[in-house]
Image (cartoon, rainbow, N blue to C red):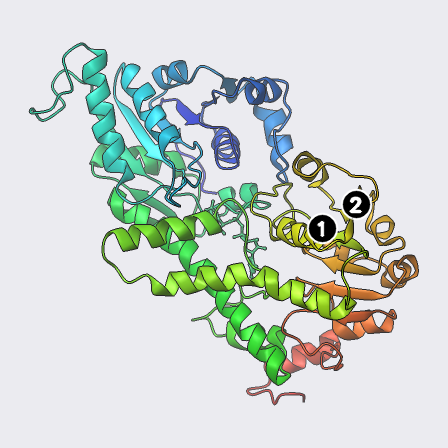
Amino acid sequence: MRASKRKPAFKIAVLGMGHVGLPTALGLAELGWEVIGADDDAQKVKLLEESKATFYEPDMQPLLTKHLGHKFRVTGDVGKAVADATVLFVCVGTPQGQSGKADLSQVEGVARTVAAHLNGYKLIVEKSTVPAITAQWIKRTVIRHAHIARGNGSGAGGNGFESVPLFDVASNPEFLQEGKAIENFFHPDRIVIGVDSERARELLEAVYRPLECPIVVTTPTTAELIKHAANAFLSTKISFINMVADICEAVGADVESVARGIGLDPRIGTQFLSAGIGFGGYCFPKDLRAFLLLGEEHGADTSLLREVERINLSRIELFMAKVRKALWVVSGKSIAVLGLAFKPRTDDIREAPSLKVIDCLLREGASVRLYDPKAMANTRRELPAQPGRVTYCQSAYEAAEGAHAVLVLTEWDEFRKLDLKKLRRALAVPVMVDGRNLYRPDQVHKAGLEYISMGRPGTDPVVRPISPARNAERRRMPAVAAGS
Ligand code: UGA
């Protein structure tokens, strides 16, 4: 972080205290801003007022404890938050609507609330993931409703600003990953600022001044497109490596080595090349669909994105085929499931691939023994315990007790550190189907388990541990012959 210059005096309101809003609000408070967090969910506000984070995110609770009542306060009165602040970050939900397009009713609701409380200049900053041209709609809605609130019609016909205090709408897409949101906030790769006025640009640059990273300044619509394209590209990378994993399996190659072998090329990069049961969560599946539909609406060829989506959806069936092949008969079997969250370091289970796998297992007549380090309470709400059918366990070992196979569905560090021999002793049948390639095959075999993973030759001991010294030596060599 840069040494902060004297801060301009204005308050920030963050509207929506969800997975984007709360980490953003606390990050801004830590940067020294006075932040009002607003949400119309009274229960959420009550918990936050008691300094209880409403979801699990590493390093978030200490920031809440530190800033609550000082730099950060919470309110259920969104209108008052709008009236009290100058910069308004819109972080409300944009869930997938029936048609697959984003449901923007909460964004529209915020625009109307802003219109009703325009008591001076406001900078409305969209941070929620929204389809391109939403900023234009926010602007239009605020003008329209500000006029209605002032009793002078919709403002249509004029330039729209007569008698309405000045405001700007900017797009400042977030790139926070769940499980790393706080870390990402303080160490962004870049900040994208989509503005159409100097005043808006200066304000947003001032907000983020303490953070050192490249800033991309562009128009609101281009900023919206950057967000669409970023998530679509990352999803594409995942589906690509999953397709490669299938080919690896067919020809006896190892997708982990392929990912490393291509990823070390900086033009490709090593991240988001983990093959497995596909991407889930609140963002990728819905954002991909929204982008695809937006493109189609405007006549663009989005068949690439359709394939990305199709490959992702097919991962569950592909994984289930592995389970069936490993077990022969699924019905009547007890299956240990390690991992429920859609990814590690979060308790979020929205669109989690694990839940789709569990649903298939139950429909095929298996019973499940579930364990996750953080996502048990959320899963229990969706899928209550059922004696003899759905059992929640206190540890991975307890889940394995008497099971006919263990499935790994989320790559928690806790699972990497498991004593695999102990796990095998707990199982009735020593079979592991790993949907996240968490272990080396030789490591699992040594513990006495049959091991089926994704895109790797299951039984060939192809992955050999290399000593750190040998590794360093390899890196110095100009060319590395495979298997040398
Ligand atoms: C994603 C983006 O990474 C963020 O930059 C963005 O801000 C966020 O969406 C959003 O739009 O709000 P997130 O959904 O929190 O973040 O999680 P990711 O780490 O991107 O993982 C998404 C899914 O892809 C997970 O299910 C994960 O297991 C899966 N994944 C990820 C893979 O299957 N393979 C990989 O190599 C990487």
Mark 1 secondary-structure assignment: helix
In the rendered image, residue 203, in percent from the top left (x then y), is placed at 31, 32
Q: Quadrant of residue 6?
A: top left
Q: Is residue 442 visible?
A: yes
In the rendered image, residue 218, in percent from the top left (x then y), is placed at 26, 47
Q: Residue at x 53, y 36 (%)?
A: 19
Label 1 crowding class (10 Å Cα cut-off): few <14, some 14-19, many 20+?
some
Q: Nearer the viewer, residue 93 or 3?
A: 93
In the rendered image, residue 87, in percent from the top left (x then y), is placed at 35, 27
Residue 455 relative to residue 83: left or right: right
* Label 1 close to label 2 by CB (< 8 Å): yes
Label 2 crowding class (10 Å Cα cut-off): few <14, some 14-19, many 20+?
some
Q: Amino acid at mark 2?
A: Arg
The mark tally for this picture is 2
Q: Nearer the viewer, residue 418 or 322?
A: 322
Question: Compared with residue 155, is residue 415 higher up or lower down, i.e. above or below?
Answer: below
Residue 286 relative to residue 107: left or right: right
What residue is disc 1 on? Answer: 362
Question: In 3D space, how far apart are the residues under numbered discs 1 and 2 (Cα atoms)?
Answer: 8 Å
Q: Residue at x 53, y 67 (%)?
A: 270
Q: Amino acid at mark 1?
A: Leu
Q: Nearer the viewer, residue 108 or 414?
A: 108
Q: Residue at x 37, y 65 (%)?
A: 304
Residue 248 is marked as none
Sequence-wise, which precedes: disc 1 or disc 2? 1
What residue is disc 2 on? Answer: 389
Q: Nearer the viewer, residue 332 or 442?
A: 332
In the rendered image, residue 150, in percent from the top left (x then y), is placed at 20, 11
Q: Residue furthest right?
A: 425
Quarter of the image containing the C terminus? bottom right
Q: Residue at x 39, y 61 (%)?
A: 305
